[in-house]
Amino acid sequence: MRIDKYLWCIRYQKTRNIATQTCKKGSVRINGDIVKPSRDVYPGDVITLRKEQINYQIEVLDIPPSRVGAKLVDLYRKDKTPKEAFETNELLQYSKTYYRKKGVGRPTKKDRRDIDDFKESPEDENEG
């Protein structure tokens, strides 16, 4: 089975087209080699997939006949992704919120009008 179809069948990619594009970008490796979407997958292969800043490591146990349900995915692959990868991703999420909190940054049009009104009102009182 092709690698793009395999990734779609075991639900690592939402559509087959997205799986194909992922392979073309070079985000998929089989046994350490960057592969094209047409590369065949065999039981025993180790797939490394970069998705959402996490390097997933998957061992192929068997080839599914077609797209399988979420409960049956573990029959066809073994997830060998280290826990540190997920912890690193959580730390990245925290660091993003630390540097720039949501809603902080460039003022909206309403904020700008409020600031302009605030700046104008004290000056007018002092002049009169």
Image (tube, rainbow, N blue to C red):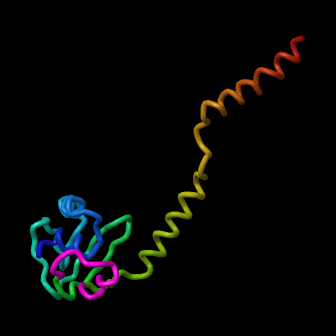
Quadrant of image for the C terminus: top right
Q: Residue 16 at x, y = what percent?
A: 20, 63
Q: Position of residue 17 (x, y in %)?
A: 20, 59
Task: Look at the image and say whether residue 75 sits in the magenta stretch.
Answer: yes
Which quadrant of the view contains residue 86? bottom left
Whether residue 126 sits left or right of residue 58 in the image: it is right
Residue 85 sits in which quadrant? bottom left
Q: Is residue 13 above or below residue 118?
A: below
Q: Is residue 120 above or below residue 76?
A: above
**In this rendering, would 52 be left or right of 126?**
left
Q: Residue at x 58, y 51 (%)?
A: 100
Residue at the image point whose x is 18% and y is 62% from the top: 20
Q: Is residue 81 magenta?
A: no
Quadrant (top left/top right/bottom left/bottom right) for the N terminus: bottom left
- Residue stretch in magenta: 64-76
Expressed as whole percent of the image width and height from the top left, the position of residue 31 reads: 18, 79
Q: Residue drawn 38% across and 65% down?
A: 53
- At horizontal 25% and vertical 63% (from top left) the residue drawn is 15
Q: Disc count in the image?
A: 0
Name the residue nearer the viewer: 103 or 94. 103
State the image coordinates of residue 67 (x, y, percent, origin top left). Answer: 22, 74
